[in-house]
Amino acid sequence: MKKMRNVKRLVLLTALCAIISCGGAGGGAGDKTANNKPTPVNPGNPSNPINPNNPSNPGTSSITRITAPKFTETNLATLKIRENIIYNLIKEDTKDGYPESMRSPITAMSSYYEVKKNEIGIRILSRSLKIGVPTVMDVRTGGVAIVMDRVNFNYPPYSEIQDTLRAIEKINNLTLNMEPDSYLFMFVRTEAKLSQTNLNDIISKTPISLRPTINGTNYKMVKFLGSYIKIDQNVDLDDPNDLYNQLVTTHSAIDINSDVTISGKSDNQIGVQIVDNKYDEWWKGNTNSGNINSGNINLKGNNSIGVYVQASKFWNEGTISVGKNSTGIYMLPEKGNDTDLEIDYNFGAANLRVKNESEGTITLGENSTGMYIYKPWVDVPAVIINHGAIQSTANNAVGMFANVRNQKSDPSGTDAIQTVLGNAGGWSNDGKGIELKGDKSIGMYSTGDAKYQVMNYETGKIAVGNSTDRSNPSIGIYNDNPNVTIANFGKIEIGKNSVGIASFGGTVVNYGSYYTSMDITGDGGIGMYLADGAKGFNNGIIKTEGSPKNVIGVFVGQDAEFTNNGSIIINSEGGAAIVVAGGTIKNYGDIEVSGGAVEERIQDPVITNSLSDRVVPVRKDMRIYVDSLGKTNPIGGLANLGLKGAELLIGAEATEKTNATEVTVGQDVLDPFNKSIKESNIPYWSVGSGSLIWEADPEIKDNRVEKVTLKKQSYTKFADEKTKDVAEGLDEKYVVASEKDKQVFNYMNTLRDAESLGKAYKEIAGSQYINVQQRINQTDNLLDSQISSLQKDNAGKAGHHVETFFNKDKHDFKTEEVPNTTSTAFGASYLFNNTDSNWGAYGGVAINNYKFKDKGHSKESVSMLKAGGYKKFDLSIGDLDWTLGGDVFVSQNSMKRRIMTDKVYENKADYNAYGFSVKNEISKTYELGENSTIKPYGALKIGYGSFGKIKEKDAAMGLDIKGNSYYSVKPSAGIELGYAKQVTDKTKLKASLDLAYEHELGKIDHKANKMKYVDTNKAYGKLKDAKDENRGNFRSGVKVGLETGNFNFSVNGGYDTKDKNAHVGVGIGASF
């Protein structure tokens, strides 16, 4: 009995294991348990079910999620990186008198000098210096005693230094006290060879009368600034006495000769440092200024860098070899260093480009990177390109790496998408490229949060070897930045359990031809892996080489989307062209499978309700996209999957040519898919919509989709309080949409999530019209400021006065919906002064061009004309001055509102505005000595403005903005400081500083405008107002100018706290 009980237990345990291995659920018609995961039965071969949990078995292509690859970054903190030094103080400078040259020496002004870090004691340039009395110079660490700046291209060290010493008369009167790591000589814009820099005996051979007294130890004899250095002899980085280790350069170019080897065995070494090279910038005509390695750099230590490039360019035409945890070429571009006429956003600025040339080879140790770039500024056009070979047999190697941050060095900088990583291989397709045979290695690695592009060019080749762990494989191109686009035109070879391209978010496009395809050569290899919402497009060829087992052409993970426009050719036992695990596929191309492979496979099915009358287990993560115009092809081989359910996603393409709110998808589109499903023996399926806006209503009979009706849902269903009025207008606009409108609607029909649709609502909402009144008022205030300045400058001068001006402003707003702006304005102001009667008349014209910092970079031009007059009164109370003035203005405004959806649409509208203002100012001026004045004042400005109806014409989603007005009541109080000094008989220097506080009591920002879409009858809806903007404003302004006779020139600047407006300007005037 006991033995029988044991047998029963064994049978029960075996049955339980069998149930567990089958997924633990039968998936019957009444089963609604969402956590059960039934295993499909293959009706064609019930004895050989596909087992997603055992990828080693033939007939399987199931994989686990790829984990983020390990990346080891070289630790810069342990390396001695040279500073980017700016010398900002020179104690004794002979830079004047040229070309008189050495005729009349300059006499030193002091008998004692302290030269601190990054300072210069004496610079010899165009005249000699005379040390008339005994003089002491204490040179601190980092300071330079004597600089020779004569642009000497050829560097014979003895004559150069002796020339420098001879240029200092009575130099034996000079005593130099040198601290450690200070510099005795520095040569600027000079060419030198490393072998020429041994200067230890030069001073000792110089006569006493021609040299200073030098005290100190451990100081450096010579330093080169902005120079060109050629490394012409071998270098041992481990020998502290090696000339190369004594060489100090700043802002200089370095070339390594082809017969030279730079070697080192210690940890934390750098072979070559190029920091902010200025040599090529200063001497464009010099063909020798290169930053080129033609030799060999061989570093065996841990955490080392072959070449460190900061804010410069570099070419590798030789060999670079690094050990563990190291980097071959490390690039750090900086803002302000991209000032080069040769800018190509596929290849970067010429002076911020790092290339491994076709003759170059980079060899990597374990955990090391071939070419590395960190870009803290997305708009700085820097790039690293591989034309040569990057190779490794070690594990965890990375060929090329980019980390780009989504911040701009210049807020108005370019939004052009830049190529940051480029693998071009050899120009003749000679097999060079990235070849990494070690485990867990990455060919090209992109990360960060900025939008940029990674390119494997047509001549580029990436080969990754075999991987031991399919969940942590070697990858040809890896990306975890959702804003990156990977473009593969070249060849990618994929070893066992490895992946061609893996992208977590972002976009992948595979181009190419049969000769530049994505080739899977090893068992378990994957061509393209998409996850976390990534979008993949195959416009080329993904194929197997030979007949490896268990391969996957494309893996489509959670929320990912894959579109096949090319060919997927898989010859693999247990393989699959496409594996879907939570994503969507669109097949417009060809899929060829053989050797037991299937076209499509499902991983981790889920339970859902079908759209038929029964509740069944439907594998909704197998989504087959159906182009409703019939452009997609069905997926074959479904019978091999043993599925009980599938889902067709019906696209909204059939709605593109009509404004109807219901569209039927007919049999001509559905028949090929019905045939495919019938042959698959799948009894149940669901039909869903590929669009958020359109609902799919299927008619299903006898397990056949007879037709599908697409029904438009209301746009308000997906709107919030901020976008409700926009959505209501869209519902009415849809049925009367023009051809341009329809393009925007068609774009919105492709969206599948509410977040993307909400962004589209905000883009077309017309936020540029929220603060129309504010821009009119800003231009009015600009003219007021120019006219007021003209009045102050000519307060006691009768007659006519004219001044032209140019101003640049920047406005940042608190209201989220209001786009920030920059503006440039130019114009002229006129004043007639009658000093006898204390009255005057004035006028002005300004053209103020606004640029919006929205996605489409909208623009508006405000052309304003103003005219008015003023009268001054002397008040008996405290000798106060009262100025009363008034004026009117008219303006013609031209808007170019740019909508950015899938492309940019420009909507144009012209409208007019007018207004008036009355100004009162009470002030008193006090004299502060002969040249200065101070004037406290209080003022009140009352104004009104109005603009007419704004209607966009021939526009995409054109808007009709109802005319509106504003009024302003603005008291202010401030103080003005003035300074005037006669510098010549006819020239006067004038300066002023104005500090004030003003507070807006009226309604400019706080008055909401109303909009509707053109050609709709809906009542106007309110745009968001800008009531969150500050009413109070601290204002500052400074002006400096020269007045010569009847003409004047001035520069001005200032800052307003209200909208963080930093502004600058210039003016040129005349009086007659």
Image (cartoon, grey):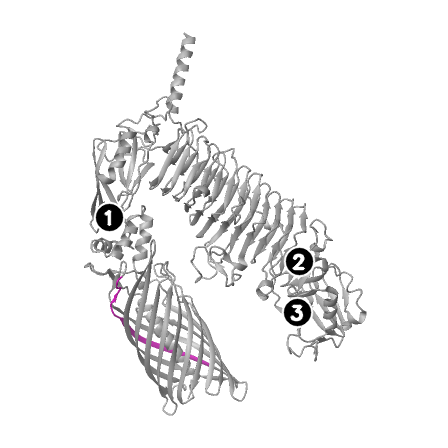
Amino acid residing under circle 2? Lys
Q: Is residue 228 left or right of residue 979?
A: right
Give me the C-alpha separation between circle 1 and circle 2. 67 Å
Which is nearer the N-term, disc 2 or disc 3?
A: 3
Q: Badge 1 local density, few (<14 within 10 Å), some, or many (20+)?
A: many
Q: Is residue 978 left or right of residue 619?
A: right
Determine whether label 1 and label 2 are within 8 Å by CB. Answer: no
Which is nearer the N-term, disc 1 or disc 3?
A: 3
Closer-to-camera residue (827/1042): 827
The disc label shown at residue 655, or none: 1
Closer-to-camera residue (135/567): 567
The disc label shown at residue 149, or none: 3
Q: Secondary structure at mark 2?
A: strand
Residue named by callout 2 = 230
Amino acid residing under circle 3? Asp
Q: Secondary structure at mark 1?
A: helix
User: Residue extending furthest bottom?
Assistant: 836
Give me the C-alpha separation between circle 1 and circle 3. 73 Å
Which is nearer the N-term, disc 1 or disc 2?
A: 2
Give the quadrant of residue 1070: bottom left
Amino acid residing under circle 1? Thr
Q: Is 167 contained in the magenta span?
A: no
The x, y position of residue 76, in whole percent, is 59, 50
User: Residue extending furthest left?
Assistant: 1017
Determine whether label 2 and label 3 are within 8 Å by CB. Answer: no
The magenta stretch is 934-954
Q: Badge 2 local density, few (<14 within 10 Å), some, or many (20+)?
A: many
The residue that appears at 28% across and 46% down in the rendered structure is 692
Location of the C terminus (image quadrant): bottom left
Location of the N terminus (image quadrant): top left
Q: Nearer the viewer, mark 2 or mark 3?
A: 2
The x, y position of residue 985, in whole percent, is 53, 89
